[in-house]
Structure formats: C-alpha cells, structure tokens
Amino acid sequence: MPATDTEDSRRGARHEPPGPGTGAPGGSGPGDSDEMASGLDALESPVSATVATSRRVLAKAAPPLAAVALVLVLWQTAYALSWSASLPSPAAVWGELAGAWSDGTLLPALGHSLLRCLIGFAASAALGVPLGLLLTRVAPLRTVLGPILSAVQSLPAAALVPVAVIALGNSEGAVYAVVLLGAVPSIAVGVTAAVDRIPPLLLRAGRSMGAGGLRGAVHVLVPAALPGFVTALRQGWTFGWRALMTAELITATPLPGIGRMLDAGRQGGELSLVLASVVLILAVGVAVESALFSPVERRVLHSRGLASAAGR
C-alpha cells in the first residue's frame, strides 16, 4: 500500500468521533448526559419542592414563635420571683381561656366581636374609600373635611363611646357608630395620601391615551394607588378593632363580646381573666393581619416589582 494511503487512513482514524459509550477521559457521552438529566430531575422532584416550602414556612414562623416563647419565659420568671402579688401565671390565664371554652362563653363572645368588626369594617371601607377619592378630586371639600377627619382620627375611642351612647343608647347601633368613627377617617386619610403619591406623569400619560374621568380612575388611578389602598384598609381595620373593644368594654349591649369579658375581669378584680381577654384580642389581631392583609400586600407589591419573590 502506498505511503500516502497509509497516512490518510491514520488521519481518518485520529479524527473519527468517538462511538457510543466511548470517549476521551474527562469527556461526556450520551450516558453521562442521561445521568446529568436524571440528577436534575431528582432536584426538581415534588419532594424537594415540599422540603423547600417547609423551610420557607418554618423561616417565617420561627421569629414570631420565638418571640412568644420569650414572652412566656419572662412572664413565668416574673411570676416565680413574685415581682407582683397580683400577677397570675401563664397557666392560670390559659385556665381562664379553657374554662370559658368549656362553659360555652368563649366562642359566642369571639363570634359576636368578629361579626361586629367585619360588618363595621365593610361599612367603613364602603364609606372611607369613596370619600378619600372624592377628597382628591374636589379641592374645596378637602380643605373643609381634611382637618376634621384628621382630628377625629386622633381622638381615642373612649372619647367617642359616650357620644354614641348618649345619641343612640346602649345598643348595637352605638357600637357600630364607634367603629365607623374610628375606621372611616383612617381609611379616607390613607386613601387620600395614596392618591397624592401617584406620579403626575402617570396620570398625564393615561389622559393622553384617552383614560380620563371615570375611565382614568378605574384603569390608571386605582391600580397605581392600590398598595396605598391596602395600607389604608389595614390601618382602618386596626382602628376599627380597637374602637370595637372600647365600645364593648363601656357599653352594655345584649350580645356580649370579648370586651365584655374584659370588663367582667375588671369588675371582679380577676387579673387572669383580664389577661386572658387581652391575649384573645391580640390573637385575633395577629390572625387577621397574618391571614388577610400581609398576603394581600405581598401579592400586590410583588405584582408591581416592589417585593422579591422570596418574600411571597
């Protein structure tokens, strides 16, 4: 065979691609690719997703649980060292809650308070949001009502209860009036502030594209101010819940609520019942905040690129 043919065959052998299952050391063949793909699939398995979700939930729940544990430890320490002769132990407060559950007074009181606050909050939102939007559109009305709403918002609920009781008597109407007076000004002021923070350029761009008047309010103004609206509603719920507890504490309504439990403990000098009522009030506030307002706020902020996906 000629030397040229032999050299060509050697060159072809050197440039021949490796076959299946073969390859240079350190190379990757189809078998290696299959193994890598199976490894990636394993990483993306439902088990891994479940573990990641569990870790996120644990990371969010750990700080508040640690705070509660710290408060209980300090409370128990203060009781054990007799720092106050009237301070009950955490077990005694838990016993009051368990006793109210067993005698059937806890759930009705909790249900009455929650129903009142939900109805009052819905009515406050229905009045406060349009009022806040109206104040941003009518300057003379804002000049007149703005200071009044701010003044009413700064009033403690205890100052509103006598006015409502004298005007409406010891009735459910007086309780709802106190809730409205506590929540409506807060929501209206918050909505007004949220609209004021909208960039004017955004509103001008909407008008240039034909979104003016009611259409502009629906498609430009409200979506742009939505994070501020959520904050205003959250603040309105907080003010309404506080006002409701004050109204139930002072008024003598036929349907007892948590505030009535608090007043019963005050009149009987039972600090354990008072603290049990306070714990219940705090638990409802934290539950509503964690289950309703915080998720809604995170979703709204994330949809606008104002919060990272890790915070969802």
Image: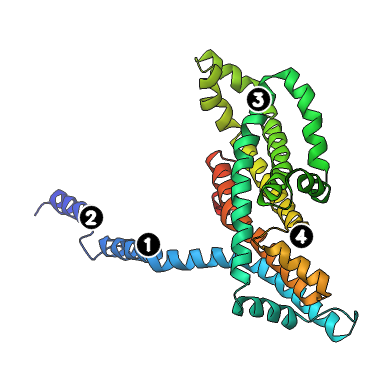
| Residue on which disc 3 sits | 134
Determine which quarter of the picture holds residue 73. Answer: bottom right
- Amino acid type, mark 4: Leu
* Residue underneath mark 1: 40
Q: Mark 2 points at which residue?
A: 17
Please tell me which of labels 1 and 4 falls first in the chain.
1
Badge 4 marks a residue whose secondary structure is helix
Q: Which residue is drawn at 32% across and 65% down?
A: 38
- The residue carrying pointer 3 sits among few (fewer than 14), some (14 to 19) or many (20 or more) residues within 10 Å by Cα, namely some
Q: Which of marks 3 and 2 is nearer the N terminus?
A: 2
- Disc nearest the viewer among 1 and 3: 3
Q: In which quarter of the image is residue 198?
A: top right
Q: Distance between the residues labelled 1 and 3?
A: 56 Å
**Mark 4 → mark 3, Cα distance in angstroms:** 34 Å
* Residue 189 visible in this rendered orientation of the protein: yes
Q: Please report whichever mark, 4 or 2, sits nearer to the chain's N-terminal start.
A: 2
For mark 1, give the secondary structure.
Answer: helix
